[in-house]
Amino acid sequence: MFADIIIDIKHEKLDKIFQYRIPDRMENELKPGMEVIVPFGNGNRPTKGYVTGISDRCSYDLSKVKEITEISRDSVEIEAKLIALAAWMKENYGGTMIQALKTVLPIKQKENARVKKYLRLLLDEETGKARLDYYLEKNQRARARLMAALLDDPVLEYDLAMKKLHITLPAIRALEEQGVLALESERVYRNPVRGGSRETPDITFTSEQQQAAERFRREYREGKRYTYLLHGVTGSGKTEVYIDMIRTVVQMGKQAIVLIPEIALTYQTVMRFYRHFGQRVSIMNSRLSAGERYDQMMRAKAGEIDVMIGPRSALFTPFPDLGLIVIDEEHEPTYKSEQAPRYHARETAVMRAELEGAGVVLGSATPSLEAMYRARKGEYVLLTMKSRSRMQSMARVHTVDLRAELKDGNRSILSRQLQEMMEERLSRREQIMLFLNRRGYSGFVSCRECGYAVKCPHCDVSLSVHRGGKMVCHYCGYEQSKVTCCPECGSPYIGEFRAGTQQIEDMVKKRFPGAAVLRMDMDTTRQKDAHEKILAAFANGEADILVGTQMIVKGHDFPNVTLVGVLAADMSLYTDDYRSGERTFQLLTQAAGRAGRGERPGDVVIQTYDPAHYAIEAAAAQDYEMFYQQEIAYREMMGYPPAENLTAVHAACEDEELLEKGCHFLKEYVLRIKGQAAVQVIGPASPGIDKIRDIYRRVIYLKAPEYDTLVKIKDRMEQYIEINSGFDKIWIQFDFNPM
Ligand code: ADP
Ligand code: ZN
Ligand code: ZN
């Protein structure tokens, strides 16, 4: 018998399958997914590898085939089903097979099992009592203490007994030898979910919730496995619907994975699932210890849990019979991996579900263009929930034109309307959130007077300011020198927009000296749990105003917040990214969703230099449809995803000249092989930062209507790179539909 093995070596050129002979002694044991040690190369260096397949035929010269040395005992096996997924990921996102295998195996190393030891009394009561008398008589106090305790409770926890009774191990060994007691041990899994109340709130589904849950249940029980897009406004009760869907699946003996952005994976969220599924729920995240994470994977494999909640990597939980994958806030950019293979959890979930006969539910108040586009095309089933579950009305939205404020002499970052409303809330002891959407922000240049932002003439994205005073387009490489007055209105008030949460906090404190202010951003949340502490303090009413970045708008429920201020809605608009309109709409909608979650209605103030921009208008109108129509028209016109597909080919090299040459040849090669295919080749361009730690970087963009066209070109490029030694020193990575 022979095994197909992927060798664990970084070098791309070794990314192929090698065959090894399976020694007789391993034949019954060796399975695909196992890590093995094999002799590799001319020196037969012991090297790690993964078994990806087993067969009785050998495609190489038999005399040259080497034998597997051993099975690695301290490593975790990859589930056979996940190997197929890894192969799909490698094919569709690029990168090597070993990178793909490691991705589907988030936990690689076995950790020591935690055991609990017990002392069990082996004597009957009468004999035990006689023993106790004997020890007392002999003045063997420790033994007497232990015997008395065992007579009270014949099974004692070892650690507890040792501590309480002050008994030493030799004493226990002695009694064990005499047949008085047995020292037993049992494996216990580490469990990161601290239990809580299992009382489920008594809710009656709204008719929209009912319809969504029922349709899923009916179709699922009929054996249909679809991908559903649950588009529900903030507060429409999506989580309750997920729970109902999961219950349907669990009742059929299957398991479910729930993906949640790491930042929203709070104690409160976990408890909502815990109330329904109790100890059959577990979590996976980066804050767990290695032992905790390993144990959660073992519990999943062993069928001890039904629901796994976690960020992107929890997608690879090795359940025996996966029934459903839920992706909450599916539009979040964190679902895209930034390391090879640069997979998107949404597409990968759909693929895993297909391989394993599971269903998928994507949920969002602001679905990604990709998901909605597919739903409209009929690839996904669309479920819609338009109203809030507890009959609260949506917040009232007020748009403030910051250009007019400036004209009227108000230079403050707080508009007069926002200040007035803040005063009013403070006097009523209601809470306020002030939000600065800095995400994706990279020093765009805009006019404070007319709102004009400097854009690339070829790409319709904002130019970024680079050190040295140039403004650069990250898509095509176009550059021009920095402007000193507005090309539109001539105002000298044009420049990089910079304002931080810290400055805002100081300013708010000065303007409202009586108010307690909390701040949440990268600086204040560096410490472990700081994030949850700030949110808890705010929820407890320890502050009147919470100032923060996009961190504060994620899914938290603060019933006493009745005013949300978005300080500069444009900040996320003019980033150098074709998704900036989408991102802005999502952030504003989420921010608006924070207001008025309780009894009292809420207000939202959106301050902007560009109130007529469709992303801001649609967010102010809380109208997803209006946004989607405009945005998809823009994507179609420009050929951006999801209308077409885009691959970024990143190239990096220590030698700038070599890099330029390599990129040039690569581009020429693509133009040559693409033939009549509708492929656009753009660049090589600057990826924004041209050099990191003395490594130069370039990027080539490929655009095509069909994803498969790009996959095929990627395959050809990989071959070309492999056979041309000029690329030995150039690092190449593919990014499909980058975020
Ligand atoms: P979403 O995820 O859509 O923003 P959630 O599922 O977080 O909404 O629900 C918001 C709040 O409304 C939660 O506190 C939830 O318990 C509550 N809720 C959900 N559905 C109902 C319902 N049918 N009746 C009453 N309260 C509900
Ligand atoms: Zn201007
Ligand atoms: Zn450009």
Image (spheres, rainbow, N blue to C red):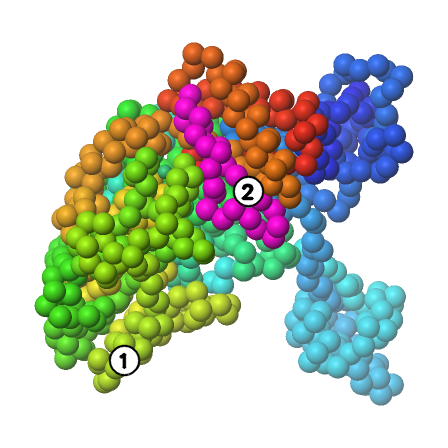
Which of 633 and 480 lies nearest the eye of the viewer? 480
Q: Who is closer to the viewer here, 557 or 585?
A: 585
Q: Is residue 429 above or below residue 209?
A: below
Which residue of the protein is positioned furthest toward the top in this rendering? 676
Badge 2 amino acid: Arg
Q: What's the amino acid at mark 1?
A: Lys
Q: Is residue 476 left or right of residue 337?
A: left
Residue 412 shown left or right of residue 260 in the figure: left
Q: Is residue 415 visible?
A: yes
How packed mark 1 is, by other alpha carbons closer than 10 Å (few <14, some 14-19, many 20 or more), is: some
Quarter of the figure with residue 134:
bottom right
Q: The residue tagged with tag 2: helix, strand or loop?
A: strand
Tell me where residue 651 appears, x and y as whole percent. Answer: 56, 37
Residue 32: x and y, percent? 69, 30
Which residue is label 1 attached to? 509
Determine the main secondary structure of the stretch shown in magenta: strand
Identify the disc placed on residue 618. none
Q: In the shown orientation, is residue 184 left or right of residue 685?
A: right
Magenta segment, which residues? 679-703
Residue sitting at x 44%, y 44%: 335
Q: Look at the picture and state if 349 lies above or below 271.
A: above
Q: Earlier in the sequence, mark 1 or mark 2?
A: 1
Split into quadrants, the picture shows ligand 3 in the one at: top left
Q: Is residue 332 in view from this perspective?
A: no
Quadrant location of the C terminus in the rendered image? top left
Indicate which disc residue 697 carries: 2
Residue 278 occupies which quadrant of the picture?
A: bottom left
